[in-house]
Every structure is written in C-alpha cells, then in structure tokens.
Image (cartoon, rainbow, N blue to C red):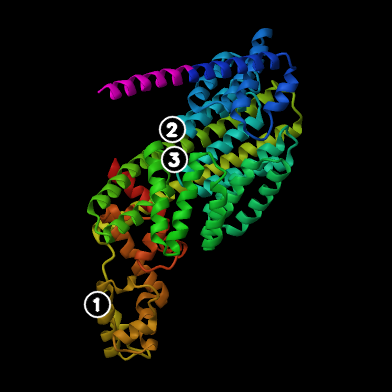
Amino acid sequence: MYVLLNLHIELKTLKKSLFVTLLLLFTQVALSQSAKIDSLSKESFDALEEYLDKNYVDSTNDVIYARAYLKKAIRIKDTITIAKAYYYLCNASRLEQAFVYSDSIIHLTKNLKGNKKYPALGYIQKGNCYYDVGKYKEALDYYLKCYNISMKNNNLEFALATKHNIGLLKNRIGEREEALKIFKSYVDYLDKSDIKSKGFYLVRGLYSLADAYVYSNKSDSAALTIKRGKQYAISLKDSLMHAHYIYLSGVNAYFSKNYKIAIDSLQKSSRIFNDEVVRAYGSLYLGKSYFEQNEKDSAIFYFDKVDNFLEKTKKVTPEFIEIYLPLIEYQKKSKNVAKQLYYTNRLLKFDSILNDNSKYLSKNIIKKYEIEELVASKNQIIQELKGENKTSKKYIYFLLALAAILLISTLLYIQKSLSNKRKYKELMESLRQNKKEPKAQSDDVKTFSNSEVPEHLAEEILIALNKFEESNRFVQKKYTLNMLAKEINTNSTYLSKVINMTKQISFVHYLNDLRVDFAIKKLSSNKKFRMYTIKAIAESVGFNTAQSFSNAFYKKTGIYPSYFIKQLNSETSS
C-alpha cells in the first residue's frame, strides 16, 4: 500500500512537472514569435510581400510574416493594406482561422466602390474555404459573388480565376466536358496575357486542364499538358505542384491501363502530399490499379482508406463512391455479412449526399453562373456604349463578340437541354405504353417471297430470333453471328439476310439495340443498378467499353445513358 501511494504521489508530481515544462516551452515559443513579429514589422512592405508571395508553403513562418505585415498595416491605418494582411493570414492559417480572416477581408472592404481587388478577394477566399471542407453549395454562392463584382469592376483576371474555380466545382459533380471547356478558355487567356504572377496561375490552370483531359479519356492530350505543367512547376521551383503532376500522371496511367506505372507514380506522390483530398484520390487509384491486377487484398486496403476519408470529411464525389461495389462484392465472397451490410449502408448514405450536392450545383451553375455571365457581359457593353468607360473601340468590339458567343452558347445549351428532356419523355412513354410491339411474324415472312432465303427457313429463323431475344443471351460478351447461327441450326448467311431484311440493320446493330433495350428496362426498374458506373453497366449488358455502350445508347435513343440515369434518379427522389 505504501509503495502504491508513493507511486501515485510520484506520478502526480511528474504530471505537474510535465505540465509546467510544456507551459514554459509554449510561453517561450510565443515570446520568441512575438519578438520576431516585432522585428519583421520594421521591414518594408515590399520585403514582407517578397517572402509571402513565394511559391511554397511554410505555415509557421508564413503566419509570423503575415502577422508582422498586419501589425505594420494597422500602424498606418490603411484599409487595403490591412485587408491584404488578412489575405496572407488566410493563406497561411488552418481552415477554422482562414474562415475568420476571409470574413475580415469582406467586412473591411464590402463598402468600397470600384476597387478591382476588394471585396472580391474576400469572396473568393471564403469560397475556397467552403470548397476545402466539401461545402460546395456555399462555395458556389461565394464564387458567384466574386464573379459578379469582378465583372462589375472590370477585373477580368479575378473573373477568370473564379471561372476556374467554378470549373473545379463542375469536376466535383462529374460534369467533366463542361469543366474541360472552362479550363481550356482559362489557359488560352493566360497564354495570351502578360498579367502579374502568370506562371503561378498557369501552372495551376494547366493542372486543372490536364485533370479534365484525364477524366474525359483524352490520355494523349493529358500527357502533353502534364509534361508542360511539370516544366512550369520545375522552372518556378514549385515542389508541391510538381508532386501534383506526378500524381496526375499516375491517374492518367491508370486510365491508359498501365497499372504498374500508375502504382509507381501514385506511391511516389503520396509521400509528399499533406492534402487529405489528394491523398484520398491517390488511395482510390492505387486501389483501382491493384484491383485491375487482381491483387484484391491490396486494393481493399486502399479502398478502406477512402472510406475512412469519406466518413471523416463527407467530401463525396462520383469517383469515391465507386469503391463500395468492389468492397461489397469482396465481403460477399468472404461471407462477411456484417461488413457487407456496413458498406451497403455507406454507399446509400454517401450517394444521398452526392445527389444533394449534384442537384444544387448542376442547377445553380447553369441558372446562376451561365446566365449571370451573359447578363454581366451585356451590362458591361451597355456601360461602354454609354461612354461610362473610356475604353478603346477594339475592346468594345471584343465585348460585343464575347456577349454574342455567350448568347449563342446559352441558346444552344438550352436547345440541347430541351431536346434531351423531350427524347427522355418519349423513351419513358414508349416504355410505359409498350409502343414497340413486334411486327406480326407473317408480315416478316412475306418479305422473303422473292428473296434468296426460302420462306419456311425464314419463318424458322424468325421464331428462333424471338426466343433468342426473350432469353437475354445477347448480354454475353463477344457474341457473334456464327455463334447465334450455330445455336439455332442455320447458316450465318441466311441468318444475316433475315436480320437485314426484317430489322433493316446489321447483326452488330441488332445486337447493340437488344442490349440497349435491356439496359433501359433494367435501369428504369432497378434503383441499385443505377448506382453502378457507366463502365459497369456497359459490361453487365454485353458491351466491351463504356464508350461503345454510350455511343450505341445515343444512336438508339438520342440521349446518353448518364443523362437518362440522372433523370431517372431526379424523378424517384422528387
């Protein structure tokens, strides 16, 4: 008992001693930082800015320099300089503090009139903070505020930067083609401009463009853009962006089916990143690469990392959700029912979050961003023509041309959207009313009265084709004309002629149409099937690639399967 009491007293003494030591250490660090801030605040603004505008991040020193800048700015009581200090603090601080500093920029400068940078800079910073925590609705709202005020104050550089960030939001909800257009125009503008910090913007713009190329299955364009961006990163000594390009080359290698190269690049870059989102994407594609090489245990290890990230951050994207189908299948084969249920619930939970974000963003990016961009350009032209802005005629003509392009683009988009909706309704109506009734077999047989195929053989082939269509054997991959002819005891020449004369299409198109019809019925009736990726759906109905499935679907219906699924999901959730 005495020994235990003594031990307890010693532990208490040790804890107190440790606490005092840590307190003294913290106080010493704080005093040291305070002294350094005082010393640095005597430096010129130019000297402080030269350090703070560097291309790498050093959080501890960045905060000290930014605080010195703020102290110096408060001393001279200059609103813009104080706002700039908050901007530097926002970049150097943790997210919780960054939110506060972005609010400080907005509060200080919201009543400024005609300033090109403020309060727009505060809005874009706050939008970035929301983007980083996965709150995309709020991010979009602040990006739009920045965009509108930048257009109003004729700050094309800020407007383009915001446009770039809206492109990132489109990426987040899987609208890759739309994002690609935005990033192309952003890089094209930078290539032609001579703005300050052009290299800084270009190295990031090229990364976003390369990323969009990767996800649009344009691997050659992606590789060229990655190479160019990597050269810029090296010339700027930007080690973080250089690591990003190594990571992206790994993702591009995955999509090009070079899985060993993908694993090598992704593992190299993962050792450098602190950004948890990029690390999660690295884990996603490491898992996928191992999965494709049939190294299932390694794949599941990385997929679990993505699952942990989603639980922690709720930053859901279409790509992240793809991990759950292989996780569920793996647990099913392992007969681990509890884990299978767990991952199924996770899939449903995160799919719900993704749908909420996607609906808001797709709706508001179109209605708020594209239309407001058009209105802002129009108002700018009116101001120019009224003589409120003494700009050259050449610039006025440029704005007029830009407004015309935007107007045409918007009208074309609206026309395409209406056409897609009409075709979707027609497709659903034909499903409901069973309009596609098969033509009477006797009518089909009559077409062979003067053909090379005897009528009795044609009749037998048509009966066999009906049975083939009902059996769903057409979902088998690499199904050929010879295989079907052998199954129904006829020759491939007669079979081909019967299909050509009765269906007015070739065997390949006949097979594709059957597969598309099967996919439409299954997607319409099975919500879980709609959760699959386009690639998985394509393979399950007999197509070799997602692209061949999408092309066949569009040829038959006039809309793409991704649009069809989106409309089905919006109907069931409304």
Residue 426 seen in this snapshot: no
Query: Relative to 76, does residue 537 appear above or below in the rendering?
Result: below
Residue name at image x 33 percent, y 70 percent: 475
Q: Which comes sooner in the sequence, label 1 or label 2?
A: 2
Label 3 sits on residue: 362
Left or right relative to 438: residue 234: right
Label 2 sits on residue: 135
The mark lying in front, picked from 1 and 2, is 2
Label 1 sits on residue: 467
Q: Which residues are magenta?
A: 1-20
Q: Amino acid at mark 1?
A: Lys
Quick one: SS at disc 3? helix
The mark lying in front, picked from 3 and 2, is 2
Q: Which comes sooner in the sequence, label 3 or label 1?
A: 3
Residue 545 seen in this snapshot: yes
Query: Relative to 29, does residue 551 appear above or below in the rendering?
Result: below
Q: Quadrant of residue 59?
A: top right
Quick one: SS at disc 2? loop
Q: Amino acid at mark 2?
A: Lys
Image spot of residue 403 (x, y percent): 62, 36
